[in-house]
Image (cartoon, grey):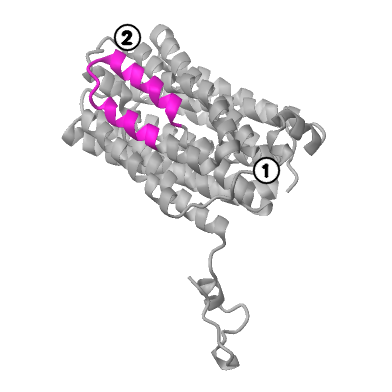
Amino acid sequence: MLILASNAPSQRPEPGHHHDRLLRPLAGWQRNLAALWFAQLTAIFGFSFAFPFLPVYLRELGVHNPGDLAVWTGVTGGASGAALAIMSPIWGTLADRYGRRAMLLRAMLGGAVTVGLMGFARGPVDLLVLRLVQGATAGTVAATTALVASGTPRPRVGWALGVLSSAVAVGSALGPLVGGLAASILGVRAIFWAGGGLLAAATIPVFAIVREAPPGQSQAGRRPALAVLREAAPGAVAIVAALLVCQALLQISNNGFQPMVVLRLLEHLSSGVEAVTGIAFAAAGLSSALASVMSARVARHFGFRAVGALAALLLAGSQLISGYGPNVPTIVFGAALAGAFFGMVGPIIYTMIGLESPSEVQARVFGLGASATAIGFALGPLGAGLLAARLGTALAITACALCAVVLAAVLATRTREPAR
């Protein structure tokens, strides 16, 4: 939208008038952020439309024994993370060389194909293989984060990543709610087909609106990321390494906890589990969305490190509420609280990484961050599933809470408040 100028003073709005703000054209980074917010919302909606229901789908595919169901839930839940951990540094390097936008489109299209094919799975092995392929080809959050962080003015990086995290959280809230209702009416297979279609639709705003400066050809862009980090600031390498560990711990805790919530609900419900699962994950996603938007403001006032450590401790306490709650409402309440504190910690860690990393290597650093996230995607569900099979879901959730406590300790003792 362009400003209509005139030489007549009487036709000009007063300085500071609200029309100035309404008519002022958006900067390029703001247009990108708006388009990427919508694209990320649609992509996460597509993913979360289906994946919270993996334990329910596995039971439909013939896995009925509770111990076997816990193991298959962990293995299929962690498979995509294992593949993503291997591929993320490769995608990050290619993003620095060929552009972040191309990598985002690749991730969305890869997710669309694999998620859609999961609706045709004949058994748990088919689902496992497709989860591996999905992990190797997808990774929309890391690609979008790198694109936003590299194209946003430094003073606005924290705010922009918080806004972007809200898209993840809103998609995570709406997806399970709508998916749960759809699964109860149309069946679980149909929601995988719909999820693939939504991921394909997420490419439209990226194609149509998002623009990116050509990848830099400077020597800095070709040098190893460690060398650039060492020159950026004293201790930057150690701080970024600690933050990557924090990112892995956060994802181990959260992604181990989420399928255990479904298993806890299966312990209490003989029917209608799809709808209740959708409500539980929708509540978690909604609270996460609200918290992610507020996190940057709170962290700027009280400090990123302090707020992140406190939120991690509260995340652990919330998970224990679901783990030991005596009934379905308590389990859902604990999940909603856990979503809120996860929504605070995630953007804080992303922002701290972005502020510690020079723009020349941000895509590579976020690629490593995606690997750390993927390790959490792999180890969280796998470890929690194996523990649940042997010791029960409550103790598996306790292990997830302990990971959140360790995360708080690392944030408090091994990181620093970033320069803003």
Q: Is residue 58 left or right of residue 257?
A: left
Q: Amino acid at mark 2?
A: Asp
Q: Earlier in the sequence, mark 2 or mark 1?
A: 2
Q: Residue 113: which numbered mark, if any?
A: none
SS assignment for the magenta stretch, majority: helix
* Residue in the picture at 51% in, 47% down: 164
What range of the chain is rendered magenta?
109-138
Residue at 69%, 46% (x, y): give it.
302
Asked if residue 315 is positioned above or below residue 166 in the image, the reply reads: above
- Total labels: the figure holds 2
Is residue 291 visible to us here?
Answer: no
- Measured from the top left, where is residue 357 in percent x and y? 69, 38
Asked if disc 2 and disc 1 are in contact, CB closer than 8 Å, the reply is: no
Please name the amino acid that badge 1 sits on: Ser
Residue that numbered label 2 is attached to: 68
Residue depicted at x 43% and y 25% = 135
Q: Nearer the viewer, residue 3 or 189?
A: 3
Q: CA distance from mark 2 to mark 1?
A: 46 Å
